[in-house]
Image: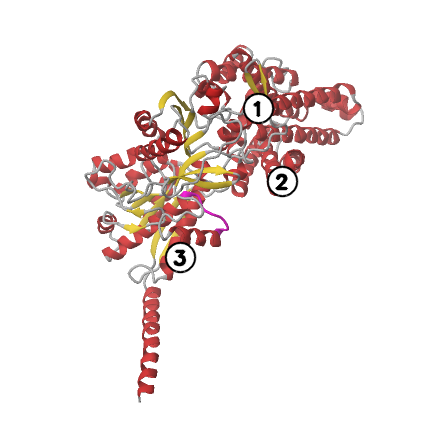
Amino acid sequence: MLALQILVDGFAISALYGLGAVGFTLMFGVCGVLNLAHGGIMVIAALVGWWVAADYGAGPYGGAAAGVLAGMAGSFVTYYAVIRPIQRSRAIPKVEEEIFILTGTLLWGIMLQVGLNYLFTNNPVSMQPLLPGVLTFAGVRIPWNEVLIAVLCWGVIGLLSLLVNRTRIGKQILAASINPRALTLLGFELGRVYLIVWTIYGVLAGLAGVLLASFLGASADNAGALTASAFTIVILGGLGSVPGSLIAAYIVGYAETITAYLIAPTLRPIPALVILMIVIYLRPQGLLGRR
Amino acid sequence: MKFWQTRCAGILGMAVPLALATITAAVAADQPPIKIAVIAEESAILGKSITDGARLAVTDINAKGGVNGRMLELVTYDDHSSAADAVRAFQRAVQQDHVSAVVSTFISEVYLALEPWSARLHMPMITAAAASNLITKQVHDDYDKYKYVFEGWLPSPVIAQAVCDSSHDLFVGMLHMKTAAIVSEDADWTTPLDATQAECLPKAGLQVVDHVRFNPDTTDFTPIFNKVEANHPDVLITGMAHVGVQPTVQWHDQHVPMPMGGNSGQATNPTFWKTTNGAADGVITQTGTVPGVALTPRTIPVAEEFIKDSGKFPAFTGFTAYDGVRAFAEAMQRAGSTDPDKVVAEMEKTDMVGTLGQLAFYGRDDTYTHAMRYGPKYVTGVFLQWQDGKQVCVWPRDKCPNPLKFPSFIKLPEQASAK
């Protein structure tokens, strides 16, 4: 019974970790941007979703839709207000652009956190489950919402895979991640590809934020931890590798769940850090990293 | 003639108080205000209520002429619940802004960081909710040094006693429960809370079958609930303040079949129902008071002022901060001075009708020196239960005879044994 409980809980939490990290790694893989405001954007989606559902009676699905839109809006603001000015600045040498983007998104993340604290207080909020009720299977109670979250996460990741591998725009995204210069020389507008990636990223981060709020709850104070969690998974999986991030999400999710159940809930964050240290020591590019 | 005598007496009767009031106001305007500092986290509901409560008390005191003819002025600092920020704010309040007293944080770890500074700078200070027994232990063990420190809420072991007293009446007496599990966040205030509960719950009729302490950063409580449930307790006695929404929502969504009682600081917030989307239904927690309960003649009028002022019923720290400022003001009035030693001496004599009960502090020789006195004659706090979106007072039973209600997934002992 305990093994089944670990299997189910680990699967749901890992799927959510995966969804949160996929957008983050896609962004780095294609645009070369390590967005340290990632947790802030997830929290915007969570808080706006909760606010619209609770204050405007929009229900869980209306709130979730509003949250995803807020995540997209957060993503666009990050791109237009923080990233593009740095990329277009003539005062910033190209070799220093990455460090400026890192610093810029870090500061932007802090601003988002403080602003959200001011508007919503730092008390966590929780969205209504998208699917209420509990499924009892072999003596294990599984909230239907947890099942739905796992299904949704994998559904969205599957759609993303279809988009990247089977569509014209997906192939452009793939090409931009491999050789952006060649793509430009072939007449494609790189700016348009980047904008599509930021849109996809906004949807993924927004959906992850909304699902997080309905599963575990969220507050602006979680923003830093959410960025750190995505960062750990992406480094472990290999920067820019979507399959690597998914494998890493499951390694981290199950390592945490097993520790929480079999050793102590207090030690839950430890194994991910130990695994990360070992992987960085033995394979600095991560599990499936290519640069 | 009699007509003129009556008229003159009437005019004098109106003119003299008016003139005195004008003179008092003029004198008050001439004298510098007495500054009171508030150091709390503005983005936390418990912290915001501290500032709101202190502000309301200052307004009320100033409306009645201030203290010794001087107006009170509030100086607020946001400590972001960080000990370092709080210490910096405290130093600035004393050395730069020249405040005469400090009302401070609800977090024990932060208040403990301020305690040496209060002692070093001889600055009277009261907390609105920090409950660690180390706070008063230091005052008790080294009185001359730490005598400036007061605790405006009950210390943890006393809170634990209130939990045991209420558990005896509610869980054992009314619901015939026999076992409990203690589930607490790992924080300074819960160490003595858990130790006392482990001793007093069996005496109250509840055998403790499990004891879990979890990291306050925990977000997934599923393993904790699973571990506890395996030992089949009838009730979960919680000790939470840093967390609250997440365990409550997960308890509800996962249909954990035992009721939650004890202490859940965030559940004392009137907004808790909304932040948990109603998952709070059935949760029981200790608090200062709830809407509609008149613990003293002051409770409801002050609550109404709060609602008029900020649009909502405050968290219990609003009441404790209000009483803390009033206690300081009355001590300064009696002392005829803001001299710290004289104010402390008068604070120790405090015996006033507060918003949550008769407010007095334990003395130098008591175990919890300078903490708020506990008992039916003083302050006991109340236990509320969230029922259909409302905070309903359920203990002490003489003041709150309301029935208990639980959501359908809760299995009470009779139901469990019938299965």
Q: Amino acid at mark 2?
A: Val
x, y percent for residue A40? 57, 33
x, y percent for residue B112? 32, 36
The magenta stretch spans residue B314: yes
Q: Chain of mark 3?
A: B
| Residues at marks 2 and 3, CA–CA distance in whole angstroms | 35 Å
> Taking A9 as reference, is B176 above or below it?
below
Whether the residues at callouts 1 and 3 have beta carbons within 8 Å, the answer is no
> Taking A197 as reference, is B1 above or below it?
below
Residue A16 - label: none
Viewer-nearest of discs 1 and 3: 3
Taking the image as drawn, is residue A99 in sight?
A: no
Which callout, 1 or 2, points at the residue further toward the start of the chain? 2
x, y percent for residue A158? 70, 19
Q: Image point 23% across, 35% down: which residue?
A: B367
Taking the image as drawn, is residue A239 in sight?
A: yes
Q: Chain of mark 1?
A: A
Q: Amino acid at mark 3?
A: Thr
Using a 10 Å C-alpha cutoff, classify the residue at mark 2 as few (fewer than 14 neighbours), some (14 to 19) or many (20 or more): some
Q: What is the span of residues highlighted in magenta in the rendered image?
A: B310-316
- Of residues B394 and A171, the one drawn nearer to the viewer in this rendering: B394
Asked if badges 2 and 3 are on one and the same chain, I answer no
**Dominant secondary structure of the residues highlighted in magenta in the image:** loop
The residue tagged 2 is A52
Circle 1 SS class = helix
